[in-house]
Image (spheres, helix red, strand yellow):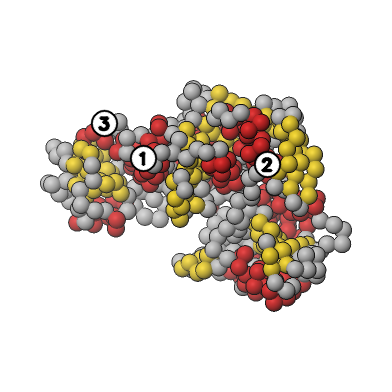
Amino acid sequence: MKKLRDIIAEISAIEIRGEHNPDIMALEYDSRRVERSGCFFAVVGSNSDGHDYIDAAIERGAVAIVCQRVPENICDEVCYIVVEDSNMAMADMAASFYDHPSRELHLVGVTGTNGKTTTATLLYDMFTALGYRAGLISTVVYRIADKRIDSTHTTPDAIRLNAMMRRMVDEGCDYCFMEVSSHAAAQYRIRGLHFEGALFTNLTHDHLDYHGTYKEYIRAKKSFFDMLSPEAWAVVNIDDRNGEVMVQNCRARVLRLSLRSMADYRTKLVEMSPDGMQLLIDGQETWVKFTGRFNAYNLTTVYAAATLLGVERIEALTTLSTLTPVSGRFESIAADDRTIAIVDYAHTPDALQNVLETIEEIRRSDQHLIVVCGCGGDRDRTKRPEMAAIAVRYATTTIFTSDNPRTESPEAILDDMVAGVGDASNYLRITDRGEAIRTAAMLAKAGDIILIAGKGHEDYQIIGHQKHHFDDREKIREAFASTHNNTKN
């Protein structure tokens, strides 16, 4: 509980209507969740306007309203704080309400199109293995030390972010590793957080349905680095052409990593197999339980962050060699006849190509590759034909199917994908994802490889506005059980 005037002291209010200084018990931007003595933020979103729900918030017990315009009907018992941007005010006030918990943590943010979840999760795993208490905020799960919380967003809203970090501090965590999405940066969810370090993985086309243009997508990612303090550090992958763009005019200490050229952190991929890779990191050979060039980048990023956080070089490399892949990221499921299914979250053209290039490097000439993939509905349509073209280029057979169609017609999504395959004929269209996976298992001969891309760790499918239980890993195990004997990891 805090006095209203205390938590608005750090924001620039255009107007404060009302002389009240009530006790604030909670912050909320969803009027349906407002409770007694709450402060409600009227946020203007892409689908709704919080100003339309101010009366509902007051009825539920809001005693303070943060808004961008004063409503016509004023309640005398309520204090109205008019601001330029409700999202910005919400971030600043949330940090103040929870006593700036990020200042009490070694907070590291990871941004980029691909690799965010793996990098953040492996940092959490490494520091946990080293005996520290740490927090994790990722697409797959949120963690407060050993407590697990279901993830709702890659980066949650500013209120929940600060609330979770306060819990981390209260439960003895010293570190927090979090994904920073482009949406979070654009919507000021990370505003007011004190980052010790920032990591950039790579950048390819994604989320253009939200940002509109690739330029705006880059700007959103770059804004994360623009907000860093001079005391912070930033590590960027300079093998990606946007690596240097991210840190233009960045006030933090900038370090670079590369697999191709001289850099502060240099890695060479010595050997790769289905079971792992031999890497030369910082001049030291290390065997890791990961495969794929994209994972070599992720692991180099993890190593760089760990050493910058004070872990000794050899200790970081030794711990790195014990870590295991993240759920749904190049996750291998094998049948008794050596047929292998790889389940991966790859849902962008670049991620799909990275996975397929890795499989191409490790598969034998006698192994067929069957790819099952789709594209999400109500999302960036421009990547659909590109992903389809990539799939048919590498696969013996590609099966185009549903991902999360949401409110779009699954057949229309497949039409968009097929438009990118040109004269290729090595594909099938099977709208039902379960049937597509079963078909892939039936087509595969002993020892072949099946890639099931797009959903990875997700255990649901969104059709219309409803979530239905659906897990690619469960489906392929069931398919293997009926076509390739029992399954095993």
Name the residue type under label 1: Asp
Label 3 belongs to which residue?
9
Asked if residue 84 shows in the view, the reply is no
- Cα–Cα gap, marks 1 and 2: 31 Å
Q: Is residue 12 left or right of residue 179?
A: left
25 up-or-down from 3: above or below: below
- Tell me what residue is drawn at x 59 percent, y 59 percent: 455
Q: Which mark is residue 170?
A: 1
- Tell me what residue is drawn at x 74 percent, y 48 percent: 276
Asked if residue 487 shows in the view, the reply is yes
Quadrant position of the C terminus in the picture: bottom right
- Tell me what residue is drawn at x 76 percent, y 53 percent: 274
- N-terminal of the pair, mark 3 or mark 2, is 3
- Tell me what residue is drawn at x 56 percent, y 28 percent: 310
- Cα–Cα gap, marks 3 and 2: 48 Å
Which structural element holds mark 1?
helix
Name the residue type under label 3: Ala
Where is residue 91 drawn, in percent x and y? 36, 39
